[in-house]
Amino acid sequence: MSTLYVDTLEPNQNTAITAAAGKLLPVGHVIDHKYMQYGTQINLSTATYTDTGLTLNITPKSTSSKFIITYNVFVYVFGVSNQWVAGAGRILRDSTAIHTDAYSLGRGALYNVGGPNAYIMLNSSDTYEDEPSTTSQITYKVQFSAYGGRIIYLNAIAQKAFLSVTEIAQ
């Protein structure tokens, strides 16, 4: 038995490289993974989308790769009796919004915040699969907005949000 060691394999005249089954990394394996946390408090009171501090750069290894983008943000609302609170999160690839979650404050999107000293703390998370079809660097970013004139606080009370981007081979 012989062993051949190489650093790079290049196909001849743009043809595919073939190998015995199981000898190349299979479709679905993780090529790259990036993760970051952000803990600075952000106060939102308008429906204008605002950066959350969750931003990651990643350079795809293949134009056929898929990306799984997941984020979680802690949302804190200090309320007044009988007020409704809603917001939305969205994911951007570079400067283009690729996914919006209008129900990002929870399954019902609207929460009754009772009593003048009451508050609620929610986890707002979302996952999206992207197919950018490029090998140029990509910047993924999470933005949030608030609706109904109420102030929502992201990452309050020393909570940290996170963003995770995973490149999957196809």
Image (spheres, helix red, strand yellow):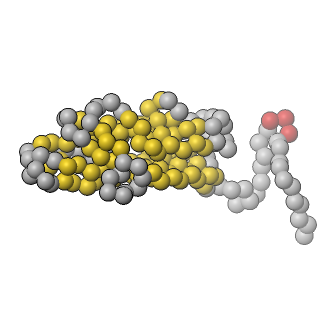
- Quadrant in which residue 104 is drawn: top left
**Which residue shows up at 26% across the image and 36% down it?**
45
Name the image quarter holding the N terminus. bottom right
Along the line of sight, the residue nearer the viewer: 152 or 32: 152
Is 78 located above or below residue 12 in the figure? below
Give coordinates of residue 131: x percent, y percent: 54, 38
Give coordinates of residue 145: x percent, y percent: 32, 36
Is 44 positioned to the left or the right of 139 in the image? Answer: left
Is 76 positioned to the left or the right of 22 in the image? Answer: left
Is 47 located above or below residue 61 in the figure? above
**Which residue shows up at 84% across the image and 53% down it?**
7
Give coordinates of residue 69: x percent, y percent: 48, 47
Kindly give the residue lying farthest to the bottom in the view shown. Answer: 1
Is 146 positioned to the left or the right of 84 in the image? Answer: right
Residue 125 visible in the picture: no
Q: How many marks?
A: 0
**Which residue shows up at 70% across the image and 60% down it?**
22
- Quadrant in which residue 82 is drawn: top left
Along the line of sight, the residue nearer the viewer: 97 or 161: 161
**Which residue shows up at 68% across the image and 56% down it?**
25
